[in-house]
Amino acid sequence: MMVGRRNLMVGSAALLAGCDKVIQQPAARRILFMGEEMHRGLQRALVNRNALAPEFTPEQRSPFFRPNGTRDPGTADYAALRAGNFADWRLQIGGLVTRPLSLSLKDLGAFAQRAQITRHDCVEGWSAIAKWQGPTLGDVLKAAGIRDGARYIVFTCADQYRGAPYYESIDLVDAFHPQTILAWALNDRFLPVMNGAPCRLRVERQLGYKHAKYLMRIDAVASLDGIGKGKGGYWEDNVDYDWYAGI
Amino acid sequence: MKTVFRHRLATRLWHWINAVSIFILIGSGLGISNAHPRLYWGSYGANFDPAWWELPRFPSWLTIPASYNLAISRRWHLFFALVLAFGLLAYMIVSLANRHFARKLRVRRSDLSPRNLMADLREHLALRFHDPAHPTAYNIFQKLSYVAVIFILLPLVILTGLALSPGMNAGMPWLLDLFGGRQSARSIHFLCMIGLAGFTVIHLALVILAGAINETRSMITGWWRVPEEPKP
């Protein structure tokens, strides 16, 4: 019996459509979404928690570091900060900390600085290499004093998505990783507005959407419940992106 | 009519796990490709950098899900990537232990002589795929293509996939050195997919030519009916 090429194609299209039906089943969806936890578990088990992302030489940088997502928050508050060259910008460090901080750009510059040339990987598939500089998030969190019970660090941004500020979160392993910095400089200049001025997160072992731009607040929290829709970030809440973006 | 036991349980299980995984991985992978359909060589590569291949936008009847959704394509892809990788690992361990590779896939130097290859090509063109003296043995083209898929294409597609992970880059930076940077790994990953898709199409065509029902049954139950000798 011969199976025609046409039948094969029709069969294949039906199987593909079947996949779309499968993922509408809550149980199937739960199993599929467990892949994220498996990858996180495997990576945490196989990779030293302080293993560094590859770093590059100045010559290996991309000619142009393309922006993505918000290129200008465009709010009145942000426009006012920008007009004053971010002299009035303050980064609030709060939540489960013993000493809440309010840091200016000058304050960030007073911490020990880390400069690194790293590769930025967008979830879409492209990569760009650039130099970043700023204090490590770990030093800033130590200055604020993380309290017992804190498990995640939440970043709240100046840009609005669907009427709410963009936000992201990471766990303490990534928060205290030596390459996780609050970058205020890109390629030896102040961060341009399109790349997140005046300060963005660099969390080098994860995909681009975790690297929150236009930082306004950093909070230590015990749980992600009750923040946004509870999944730890704008994209995680609204379009099913993985919270753990190490792959 | 003679029936013989042809495929062990491990082979049959792995075959069907792979059939499902490869199908889903290619469909979801084409969906992921649509998010940034440009391939580069080297470590970096984005919109303003020269691409060596600007891919077409893959149509909805080829992608999982049908309508563009990068997050859901990634969920399918990353789950079945684990199935494929650990499936291959388990199959390799079992096949080394029970000497499946040595018995079924060993390629001898004499098999590769031009005379032998030409003879097998003529047999293929005549749609005769089995040596009447050893009907259950794989022919040389079969062996070479299975060896290429099991020992080259599948390991390569898994390792280039791992090299795309910024988390694994920190743990296994040598993978990036091996492939010449993350964007090179992404390009090789795509080329491996083309190889696997090509293998799958030829494999299905030959299954149909060799007798779809008999071949499919042998991969389900293990039992295969030996083709009748053509009468002179």
Image (cartoon, rainbow, N blue to C red):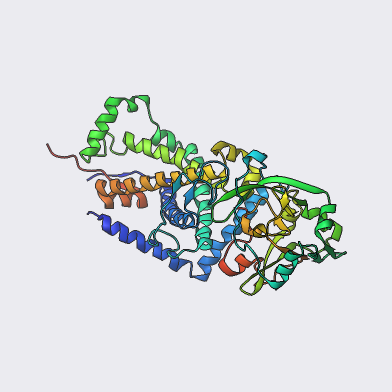
Q: Residue furthest right?
A: A99
> What residue is drawn where x is 72% and y is 71%?
A77
- In this image, B143 relative to B44: left or right? left
User: Can you give x and y, in whole percent of width and height, for residue A121 in the image?
Assistant: 60, 51
Give x and y (percent) for residue B126.
Answer: 20, 39
Can residue B51 be seen in this snapshot? yes
Residue at 58 percent across and 61 percent down: it is A34
Q: Looking at the image, which residue sits at the far front?
A: A83
User: Which quadrant of the rendered structure holds the N terminus of chain A?
Assistant: bottom left
Residue A84 coordinates in the image, percent (x, y): 77, 64
Check the image and report above or below for B176 versus A233.
Answer: above
Between residue B172 and residue A53, name the one nearer to us. Answer: A53
Q: Is residue B90 visible?
A: no
Front one among B138 and B121: B121
Measured from the top left, where is residue B122 in percent x and y? Answer: 22, 34
Which residue is at a point 37% across and 27% down the rendered structure image?
A: B108
